[in-house]
Amino acid sequence: MSRHIITGGPGVGKTSLLKALGRLNYACSGEASRQLIMEESAKGSGCLPWIDLLCFAEKALDRMIASYVAAGEDAPTFFDRGIPDIIAYLTVAGLPVTESFEAALKKYPYAGTVFLLTPWKEIYVQDEARWQTFEEAERIGHHIKNVYRSSGYEIIELPKCPVEQRVDLILKRI
């Protein structure tokens, strides 16, 4: 399977890691949620995770499925988050995980090994799309890890180290 997930709570360095992989000419799919937040905010929409998480999660799911389908099987593609991340966010919020999310989880499997970045206070920055406190980001990261594990994925926790070293660790595993 050539669809690889790089995940973790907010602000752990996923985007920087994907940019580094992209510079090495690997196909990368950016975080659907961040782009969706920017678009929905610009429209003045109420479909934002801090207003209507279920609405937002459904739109994010559609984007993630489209990215999954667009990725070919021939060469590795790295994804900034995957469908299990949406389930983790719903779980943290105490919202129901509807059949559409469960069905997508089964229909669109990723590579069996998931690369997890753990909370790193020294690099954590809040912005307009990352509204969580560091403590909330830690809690979300914990739930993300649990959802991937319970969904049958092997989790490789990447150490807190320079991006280039993280890239090397990932490339050695795939």
Image (cartoon, rainbow, N blue to C red):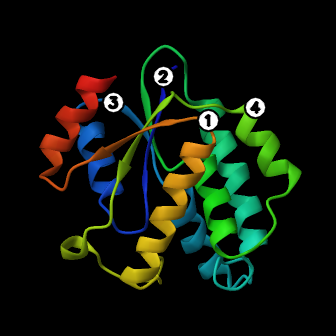
Of callouts 3 and 2, the N-terminal one? 2
* Residue named by callout 1: 68
SS assignment at label 3: loop
Q: Amino acid at mark 4?
A: Lys
Q: Are marks 2 and 1 in contact (CB under 8 Å)?
A: no
Of callouts 2 and 4, the N-terminal one? 2
Identify whether 137 is placed above or below 84.
below
The x and y percentages for residue 91 are 68, 67
Q: Which mark is residue 109?
A: none
* Residue named by callout 3: 26
Distance, label 3 to label 2, CA atoms, is: 11 Å
Of callouts 1 and 3, the N-terminal one? 3
Name the front one of labels 4 and 1.
Answer: 4
Q: Amino acid at mark 1?
A: Tyr
Name the front one of labels 3 and 2.
Answer: 2
* Residue named by callout 4: 107
Tell me if I can see residue 130 in this picture.
Answer: no
Number of on-image labels: 4
